Image (cartoon, grey):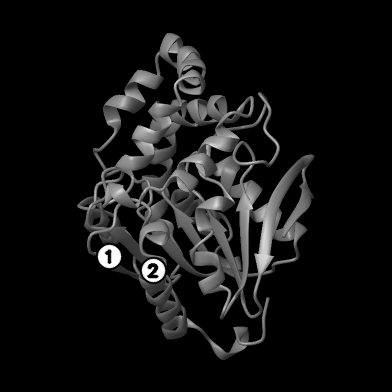
Amino acid sequence: MEEWAQVDGLRFRFQRSGRGPALVLVHGLLGYLFSWRFAAPLLAAERETFALDMPGSGYSDVNDGLDCRLQSAAKRLLAFMDAVRISSCDLIGSSYGGTTALMAAVLAPERIRSLVLVSPANPWSKIGRRRLALLESSLVAAAFPKVARQLPQVHRYFLRRMYGTRARVTEETVRGYNLPVSRPGVLEHAVRIAHSWKADMEEVQAALPNMAKIPILLLWGSKDRVVDPASAESLRRHLCCAESVVIKGAGHLPYEECPEEFSRVVLDFFKRHSSPAVAGGK
């Protein structure tokens, strides 16, 4: 069942389920809470689980004045936690949402018990740099949203690239991801994020040496074609309390392709790093 929270003049759409310590799920670029439809019920068996549409994505508010820098997204995530009265949580972020989660932990380490970063965008991944460079062109940036809306097969192509086994991409999955992309402002917001990508990655790299000692799980699919699996080791070396797991055969969205294995790995990580103080809830 969907709920809404008002945060700094923006309406956030979210769903909550389960009971236990709070767990917040942050989708990737052009994702939304739909992305967690398989994994969230499994995680909710042991956690009170919050899946949200970040502003600019899904069905949360989007507008031309929305600050698209990574640090601003992280601050909005923390403000959402305030709005739904989460003092501290475990945090799972995917792709750009993983980097958002990481930045939230940099800004407010006392509020994050542990981090699961699912193939997070990072400064060491070389995949996609040419596409990002194209979007820096004002002509391409202006044309891309219009073309993408008129040619839904473009979105289908990129969605299939995110799976390790492309046959797993169902029509229901394609329809689900296409729905919010048709909303005015969603694709434009994604393009503006691409404009600040280089500066955001530089900010992440500069922040990592000062990262607090928070337990971190880096989780990748072995067939990820979006964020280079080889970059996981470079990222891990810059984090003092990180471990890594690779899900064999999965692509960029292991929580969609392999939700049972994904949830088992994540819940095991939480159990190994939980303290008695959080056993009762938020």
Tag 2–tag 1 contact (CB < 8 Å): yes
Q: Position of residue 57 (x, y in %)?
A: 59, 39
As shown in the figure, which amino acid type bears the numbered disc 2?
A: Phe
Between 49 and 89, the residue placed more toward the observer is 49
Is 264 displayed left or right of 229 in the figure?
A: right
Eyeballing the image, is 222 above or below 110? above
Q: Secondary structure at mark 2?
A: helix
The spot of residue 59 in percent (x, y) is: 67, 41
Q: Which residue is mark 1?
A: 247
Q: Position of residue 108 (x, y in %)?
A: 59, 60
Left or right: where 123 falls relative to 101:
left
The residue under the point 67% across, 80% down is 281
**Residue 52 point in image, percent of width and height:** 63, 53
The N terminus: image quadrant: bottom right
Left or right: 228 as drawn, with respect to 146: left
Report which quarter residue 214 is drawn in. bottom left
Q: Is residue 250 above or below residue 191?
A: below
Q: Quadrant of the C terminus?
A: bottom right
Look at the picture and state if 128 lies above or below 272.
above
Marking on residue 262: 2
Q: Outermost residue, left direction?
A: 230
